[in-house]
Amino acid sequence: MTQTSGIGTDEQAMASRNGHKNLRGAAMTGIAVEVPDNRVPNAPIAERLGVDDRWIVKRTGIVERPIAEPGLTVAQLSAKAAARTLEITGVDPSDVDLVLVATMTPDLITPNVAPMVVKHLDMGATPAADVGAACTGWLHGVNLASAAVEAGRADKVIVIGSDFMSRVTDPDDRSTAALWADGVGSVLISACAGRSRVGPIVLGTDPAGAMLIHATHDEGVIRMRGAETFGAAVSHLANSAMAALEAAGLGIDDIDVFAFHQANARIIRTVGERLELPEEKVICCVDRYGNSSAATLPIALGHADSEGRLVPGTKVLMSTFGAGFTWGAGLVEWGLPEGG
């Protein structure tokens, strides 16, 4: 288990492995967020659970959440987000070298979501694969994409975080029914001149807590032991964030935007207090988006972008935590360097 304060030994070890020099740079651009049009407020959930709206807000910070309409698929919404990413960045679909989709709620057992995104966007034979690491999946995808770009194996990679958590929600479970939501976020990772603008990224696993968040094939819904998960989430989010900063040789004052996994508002607030972060720099949009697992980090980036916070050179620290337990954090200097 990692330490509960400061930088945990697990996070330190992972940071030391991610300090190598890159062969060329990778940059992140083109954030696009797509959520279902259907918005579900707390009232009907509260009535079903036998609580009131204030109980849900106090425990989660969530006021409403997007829930997919019948017939809408993860692949469709993922393709829509990817298309917007390409439009924003001015990249033709035929120039994409790889599509990665982080999800644990695919439409089918097979094919995976990523190949269906390629199909929806008519991208020909573009390689595509899903990434599975629960809420940490999108950051794993960013890490894989950046490594491929830095090593010269790809020039442009679309990385999508996409989950329809309503598919794995027990509507009668007080610990999770008000929490989960549906959404998609997408970015482009592309080659750039000079140093990499993505990373360092530290990733790790705490298998001691593996079964505290789980779903079985037989039951098909997420079960979570909330109190234990809360403590582990705060610890790993804080520790991995500090490990990433240490690996980058930066301090808290050097960061413009802090984007944590949007698990619930209490966790985000507690991490901010533990790290003594300026409240105005911490993104918290869980009130309107809920917890959409692998999609929460790119959705948080999209929220920051909508507020004008993401401009070329903005330093963003991202930190996430999910079932497994999987955890990770990484630095991004937003956008392409001047002159490309």
Image (spheres, helix red, strand yellow):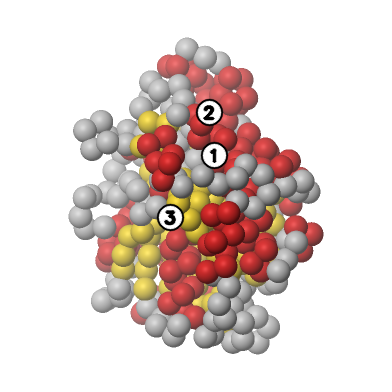
Q: Would you place residue 193 above or below residue 112 in this image?
A: below
Amino acid type indicated by mark 1: Ala
Q: Viewed as shown, does residue 246 lie left or right of 182?
A: right
Quarter of the figure with residue 115: bottom left
Q: Residue at x 71, y 42 (%)?
A: 274
Who comes first in sequence, dot 2 or dot 1?
Answer: 2
Q: Residue at x 38, y 20 (%)?
A: 172
How far apart, in angstroms, are the residues tagged by discs 2 and 1? 9 Å
Q: Secondary structure at mark 2?
A: helix
Task: List x then y, in percent, for residue 190.
Answer: 50, 77
Who comes first in sequence, dot 1 or dot 3?
Answer: 3
Quarter of the figure with residue 302: bottom right
How far apart, in angstroms, are the residues tagged by discs 1 and 3? 18 Å
Q: Residue furthest top?
A: 50
Q: Would you place residue 215 above or below residue 158 in this image?
A: above
Kindly identify which residue carries mark 2.
Answer: 227
Q: Would you place residue 204 above or below residue 219 in this image?
A: below
How far apart, in angstroms, are the residues tagged by discs 2 and 3? 23 Å
Amino acid type indicated by mark 3: Gly
Q: Residue at x 59, y 87 (%)?
A: 193
Task: List x then y, in percent, for residue 54.
Answer: 61, 20
Kindly identify which residue carries mark 3.
Answer: 137
Q: Nearer the viewer, mark 2 or mark 3?
A: 2
- In the image, 265 versus 322, the foreground residue is 322
Task: List x then y, in percent, for residue 153.
Answer: 39, 83
Kindly identify which residue carries mark 1.
Answer: 232
Task: List x then y, in percent, for residue 227.
Answer: 53, 28
Quarter of the picture containing the C terminus is bottom right
Who comes first in sequence, dot 2 or dot 3?
Answer: 3
